[in-house]
C-alpha cells in the first residue's frame, strides 16, 4: 500500500479517535497530567504482568491492572538514542543522520527550535519536566562541563531538567540541574575525553583490583565508585553520582516536580536507568531477585514505579494523571560488565517469547512492554493487541490536548489516542523496526555501522536483506544477506524464514518499506 494513502487512512482513524475522545469531553477539557516512565533495556519478558514467572513486579502489574497493557508495542529502535530521538520528535530515527548511540560528550542531536513532544505540551499550557537519562547530546560542539551547558533539554521544550548527560556507563558521571552540573566544586573542574586517556585517575584496564566487577575493554576507562566506565574523566569529585543512591535521588526529583507542579497540568518525562549497565541497585534490593544485579535492578524499577503511583495518590491527583510506562529497547544480559546476569538468569527469558533483544532487528530488539493508565479514562485491565510505536506519542498526545501538529513535523507519528486509551485495538497498519550495526575500532565500540530496517504489518514481518549473521554481546542481530519473512502469529521467535516460499508477500512488504523510507 502506498505510504501516503496509509498515512491518510490512519489520519482518518485518528479523526475517529478524536470523535471517540470527544464523547468523553471532560478528558480533553481537563488536560490530564502526563507522566511517561521510560525504562532502559527492559524486555518484554521482564515483568510478571507480561507472563514472567521468574520475577515478581507487583507495582507495574498493578499499573497494568488499572490500565491497558500492550502486547504489540514497539520502541522505535533497538538502542537508546534513536528511540528517544523518535519519542521526542515523532520522526523515525533512520530519517536523520547522527541518530546512533551517542558518546557522553556528543553535541545536541535535537536542535533548538525543533518541534518536540515537550514543546507541543508546553504550547498546550503544560509545565514540562525531565528527570533521568538524556543521551541525546548536549551543546554545540565541545561541552563546558564547568559552565553553562546547552543546548539541551531546556532548549527543546522542557521547563525543568535534572538529568544525566548520557548513560550510567559513560562519563561524566554527574547530574545536570537545568544548565549546570549539580554540586560542582569550581576548584575541582571536570574534564572529559572520549579519545586519548587523560588525567591520572585509575582506570579499570590498569587497576582491575579496584573494581566491583570486571568489564570489557570499552568499559575499562575511568573508575568511579568501583565501576570502570566508557571514557575518561577527571575532577568533579563532589558532583559524581553515587550508583546505589542514584535511583532514589532521581525519584525524589521526579516526585518533587510532580508535587510542585500539581496545580496546573504537567508533563514529566521520567527516564529511569533500570536495568541498564552498570547495575548497582540500592542495598535494599540486593539479593532479592535471585538473579543478581540485573534482576535486583528490575525490582528497584518496580518499586520506583510504585512510588510514583503512591505519590500521585498521596497528592490526590492520580485520577487526573495519565501514566505511560515503556522501555527504550529490548533486553540484554551481558552488556560489558561481568555482573553474572547471564549465569544467574536461569529460566528467565527477558524477551519473553521473542528472539534476541537489544541491538537486534529481531522482535526482542523493539517489542517492549508498554502500559497506559488513567483512572476513569484508560480502559482498566485491558490487554491490547493494537500495533503502536513510541513515535506515535507526540501525535496521540497532541490529539488529547487539542494541539495541531505543524506541517512536515513528526512525520512518522500517528494519532493512536484511541488505542492508547484502550478504546480500540486497531492500531497502526505498520511499524518500521530499526537497528544499526555495532562497529569495533580498537578499544572503541560504536553503533556507526549500517542501518538495518524491518517492517511489521499484521502478523507479518519482513527484515530487509543486509549482511551475514552477526551478534553483539550474545544477542543475534538478525541480519542475513537475503530478505527474511516471518509470520509472527505462529512463529514469534522468527525461526522459519518464509521469503522463499511466499515471494509475492515478501516483495510487497519490501516495496512498502521502500516507499515509507522514501517518505
Ligand atoms: C554501547 C555499550 C553498551 C551500552 C550501549 C548504550 C560497548 C561495548 N557497549 O556502545 O554497554 O552503553 O552502548 O546503551 O561500549 S543504550 O541503551 O543507551 O543504547
Ligand atoms: Ca536502552
Image: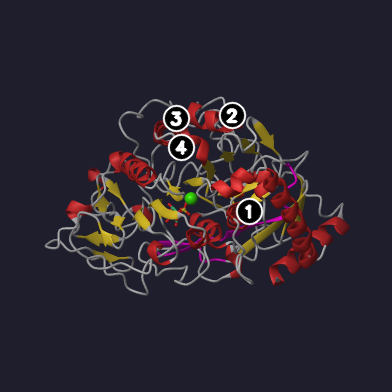
For the point 34% across and 46% down, the residue is 260
* Residue 407 visible in the shown view: yes
- Residue marked by disc 1: 361
Which of marks 1 and 2 precedes in the sequence? 2
Residue 301 appears in view? no
Q: CA distance from mark 2 to mark 1?
A: 30 Å
The disc, 3 or 1, on the residue closer to the chain's N-terminal end is 3
Other residues around mark 4 within 10 Å, as few (<14) / some (14–19) / many (≥20): some
Callout in the foreground (2, 3): 2
Would you identify the image quadrant in which residue 233 lies?
Answer: bottom left
Residue at the disc numbered 3: 291
Q: In the rendered image of this protein, does residue 128 appear above or below residue 21?
A: below
4 vs 1, front mark = 4
- The residue carrying mark 1 has its beta carbon less than 8 Å from ligand 1: no
Q: CA distance from mark 4 to mark 1?
A: 39 Å
Say whether mark 3 is within 8 Å of ligand 2: no
Q: Which residues are drawn in magenta? A: 424-449
- Mark-to-mark CA distance, 3 and 1: 26 Å
* Label 2 SS: helix
- Residue 11 lies, in percent from the top left, at 74, 59
Residue at image mark 2: 65
Q: Please, what secondary structure does the residue beneath circle 3 have?
A: loop
What is the image's colouring? secondary structure
**Tag in front: 2 or 1:** 2
Amino acid at each position: 500500500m502506498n505510504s501516503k494513502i496509509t498515512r491518510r487512512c490512519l489520519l482518518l482513524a485518528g479523526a475517529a479517535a478524536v470523535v471517540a475522545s470527544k464523547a468523553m469531553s471532560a478528558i480533553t477539557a481537563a488536560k490530564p497530567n502526563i507522566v511517561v516512565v521510560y525504562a532502559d533495556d527492559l524486555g518484554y519478558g521482564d515483568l510478571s504482568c507480561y507472563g514472567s514467572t521468574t520475577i515478581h513486579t507487583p507495582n507495574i502489574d498493578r499499573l497494568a491492572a488499572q490500565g491497558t497493557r500492550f502486547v504489540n508495542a514497539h520502541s522505535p529502535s533497538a538502542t537508546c538514542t534513536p528511540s528517544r530521538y523518535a519519542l521526542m520528535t515523532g520522526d523515525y530515527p533512520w530519517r536523520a543522520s547522527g541518530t546512533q548511540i551517542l558518546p557522553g560528550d556528543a553535541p545536541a542531536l535535537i536542535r533548538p527550535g525543533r518541534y518536540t513532544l515537550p514543546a507541543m505540551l508546553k504550547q498546550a499550557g503544560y509545565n514540562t519536566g525531565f528527570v533521568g537519562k538524556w543521551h541525546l547530546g548536549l551543546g554545540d560542539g565541545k561541552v563546558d562541563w564547568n559552565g553553562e551547558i546547552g543546548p539541551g533539554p531546556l532548549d527543546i521544550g522542557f521547563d525543568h531538567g535534572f538529568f544525566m548527560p548520557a548513560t550510567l556507563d559513560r562519563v561524566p558521571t554527574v547530574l545536570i540541574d537545568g544548565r549546570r552540573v549539580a554540586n560542582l566544586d569550581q576548584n575541582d573542574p571536570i574534564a572529559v575525553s572520549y579519545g586519548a586517556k587523560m588525567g591520572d585517575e585509575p582506570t579499570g584496564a590498569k587497576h582491575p583490583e579496584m573494581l566491583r566487577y570486571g568489564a570489557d575493554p570499552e568499559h575499562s576507562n575511568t573508575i568511579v565508585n568501583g565501576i570502570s566506565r566508557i571514557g575518561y574523566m577527571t575532577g568533579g569529585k563532589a558532583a559524581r553520582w553515587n550508583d546505589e543512591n542514584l535511583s532514589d535521588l532521581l525519584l525524589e526529583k521526579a516526585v518533587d516536580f510532580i508535587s510542585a507542579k500539581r496545580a496546573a497540568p504537567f508533563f514529566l518525562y521520567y527516564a529511569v536507568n533500570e536495568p541498564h549497565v552498570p547495575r548497582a541497585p540500592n542495598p535494599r534490593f540486593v539479593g532479592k531477585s535471585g538473579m543478581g544485579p540485573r534482576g535486583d535492578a528490575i525490582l528497584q524499577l518496580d518499586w520506583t514505579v510504585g512510588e510514583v503511583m503512591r505519590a500521585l495518590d498521596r497528592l490526590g491527583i492520580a485520577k487526573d494523571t495519565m501514566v505511560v510506562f515503556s522501555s527504550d529497547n529490548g533486553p540484554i544480559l551481558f552488556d560489558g560488565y561481568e555482573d553474572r546476569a547471564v549465569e544467574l538468569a536461569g529460566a528467565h527469558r527477558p524477551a519473553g517469547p521473542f528472539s534476541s533483544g537489544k541491538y537486534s532487528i529481531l522482535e526482542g530488539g523493539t517489542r517492549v512492554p508498554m502500559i497506559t493508565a488513567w483512572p476513569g479514562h484508560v480502559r482498566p485491565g485491558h490487554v491490547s493487541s493494537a500495533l503502536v510505536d513510541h513515535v506515535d506519542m507526540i501525535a496521540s498526545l497532541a490529539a488529547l490536548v487539542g494541539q495541531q501538529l505543524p506541517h512536515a513535523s513528526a512525520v512518522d507519528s500517528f494519532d493512536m489516542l484511541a488505542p492508547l486509551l484502550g478504546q480500540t485495538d486497531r492500531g497502526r497498519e505498520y511499524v518500521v523496526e530499526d537497528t544499526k550495526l555495532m562497529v569495533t575500532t580498537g578499544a572503541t565500540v560504536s553503533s556507526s555501522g549500517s542501518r538495518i530496517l524491518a517492517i511489521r504489518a499484521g502478523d507479518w514481518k519482513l527484515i530487509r536483506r543486509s549482511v551475514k549473521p552477526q551478534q553483539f554481546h550474545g544477542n543475534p542481530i538478525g541480519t542475513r544477506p537475503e530478505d527474511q519473512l516471518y509470520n509472527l502469529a505462529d512463529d514469534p521467535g522468527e525461526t522459519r524464514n518464509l521469503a522463499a516460499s511466499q515471494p509475492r508477500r515478501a516483495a510487497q512488504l519490501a516495496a512498502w518499506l521502500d516507499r515509507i523510507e522514501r517518505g
